[in-house]
Amino acid sequence: MKKTHIRFNIVLRQEPEGGFTTIVPALPGCVTYGRTLREAREMAKDAISSYIESLRKHKEPIPTDDETLVVKRRIDKFS
């Protein structure tokens, strides 16, 4: 089977109790956690692979982030 590369944006959110939650916006429900940034990134890689494997098994299309524009916007706090 030919290997292809797909890129996905991930969001890493530091949790107050420690560690990082990782969300993959292009894959609904694809959320994982790691105690460190490194672990969170590895867990995301595993979660994405498992998610794609399930999509293929069920003959569903694989979404991508090719058309996604990621923007960070600062909002001033309101009193």
Image: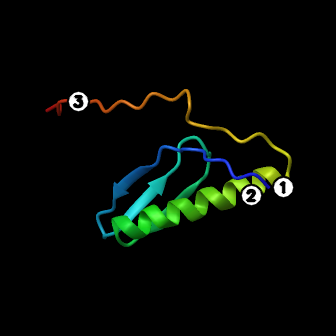
Structural distance between the alpha carbons of marks 3 and 2 = 38 Å
Question: Residue 57 has which mark?
Answer: 1
Q: Residues within 10 Å of mark 2 (few under 14, many from 20)?
A: few
Q: Mark 3 to mark 1: distance in Å?
A: 42 Å
Label 1: element kind: helix
Q: Is residue 38 above or below residue 57?
A: below
Quarter of the N terminus within the rendering: bottom right
Which circle's residue, 3 or 2, is located before the other in the chain? Answer: 2
Residue bearing mark 2: 53
Sort mark 3 into few (<14), some (14-19) or many (20+) by Cα contacts within 10 Å.
Answer: few
> Of the residues under marks 3 and 1, which one precedes in the sequence?
1
Q: Amino acid at mark 3?
A: Ile
Q: Which residue is mark 3?
A: 75
Kind of element beneath mark 3: loop
Do the CB atoms of the residues marked 2 and 1 lie less than 8 Å apart? yes
Which residue is outermost to the bottom? 35
Locate residue 36, reporting x and y percent. 34, 70
Residue sitting at 71 percent across and 42 percent down?
Answer: 62
Disc 1 residue type?
Lys
Q: Residue at x 51, y 60 (%)?
A: 44
